Amino acid sequence: MDPAPERVPDAARLLGLVSGSWKTQAAFVAARLRIADHLAGAPRTAAELAAATGAHPPSLHRFLRALATIELVRENEDGTFALTSMGALLEDDAPDSLRWWVLHWGGASWAVWGHLHHSVMTGESARSLVTGTRGFEHLARDPEAAEIFHRAMTELTRLVARDFVHAVDWSTTKRIVDVGGGYGELLASALLASPGAVGVLFDTEHAIDRGRAHLRAAGLEHRVEFVAGDFFDWVPRGADTYLLKSVIHDWDDERGAEILASCRRAIPPEGRLLLIERLVPERLGTSPDDQGLACSDLHMLVQLAARERTESELRALLAGADFRTARVSPLRSTLALIEARPASAQSA
């Protein structure tokens, strides 16, 4: 029997939804082949790009035409291909590059997403099925994966850093600890906004060495102390400002509470904790922002058995660690700045 006419549009939408994953892999392959870098100077033919990338010429031509349909490149009348403004975000050295995030999502994360069913049925991370590790253990064993991950996080941090520094009063800031700060992109922005302050980059060993190089390139190495450690056990003391960007969402409530408790033990009574996290509304709609939140929440589930949270859930976690929420300020998209202060007068 023919489908009812009113069902045809829904069927077309569903088919497009299910097959839409090709776009992820197309962007991933474009990033791997450095198509944007090869096109940064001028338009080139498929044959020229095939010679530059080592790809199979006829297949690369088909691939480039596919990239044109999703506006990562443009096919010119003379048969050459040129970079679009969105495609330029895949240039490795562009200040607003997202190349490493695309490599992360289309590579290591892609394999884990294939086991979403396991996570939905068990509430557990599917990463152990793919890597044999949990949490971020695999990064200590795989330098390439660690570099892709941390550079991807640096790119995402760069997108929100300007809004963040403009939302904070840095006038009395003297010492900043970036907890789980990766390569130190957020710390760099904070230090540039508070020229009289010094900083501490606190993360695991696999992040610290590259973080030193990253901050050296920014001309800030002389203002930063580099400390390796485990934030479940301790956090460096002696600062007035502590940063936690996109850290708590990587963990379940129990582990998230442990991280906040470590920060509370370190922070003085007059100090402040600045969190950047996504805020989930009590009820999700169908807007692009809502879909992005749903995607991120499921990403946390399948990758880490973790979650995105509502404002009330984050406030409760903070209160459980003896923090009071001083203010919540929206940042870019669904991200928000949550400023918390010690709730009790005596530092733990």
Image (spheres, rainbow, N blue to C red):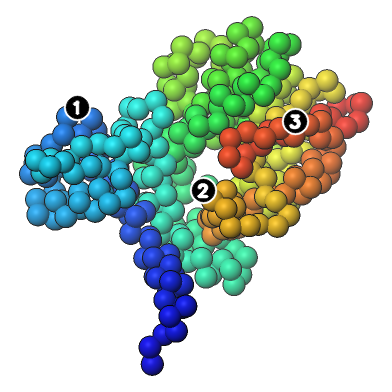
Q: Is residue 158 left or right of residue 33?
A: right
The residue at the point 38 percent across, 60 percent down is 21
Tag nearer the camera, 2 or 3? 3
Q: Position of residue 293 (x, y in %)?
A: 59, 51
For label 3, the residue is 339
The residue at the point 62 percent across, 65 percent down is 123
Indicate the secondary structure of the residue bearing disc 1: loop
Q: Split into 4 quadrants, where in the image is the C terminus?
A: top right
For label 2, the residue is 137
For label 1, the residue is 41
Q: Is residue 282 above or below residue 340?
A: below
Q: Position of residue 184 (x, y in %)?
A: 52, 26
Q: Amino acid at mark 1?
A: Gly
Tag nearer the camera, 3 or 1? 1
CA separation in Å, label 2 and label 3: 30 Å
Determine if residue 136 is in view: yes
Indicate the secondary structure of the residue bearing disc 3: strand
Of all residues shown, which one is farthest toward the right?
Answer: 345
The numbered mark at residue 77 is none
Neighbour tally class for label 3: few under 14, some 14-19, many 20 plus, Cα within 10 Å: many
- Marks 3 and 1, the one that precedes in the sequence: 1
The residue at the point 43 percent across, 80 percent down is 5
CA separation in Å, label 1 and label 2: 40 Å
- Marks 1 and 2, the one that precedes in the sequence: 1
Of all residues shown, which one is farthest toward the front?
Answer: 5
Q: Is residue 238 left or right of residue 124?
A: right
Q: Is residue 309 left or right of residue 268?
A: left
| Quadrant of the rendered image containing residue 257 | top right
Tag nearer the camera, 1 or 2? 1
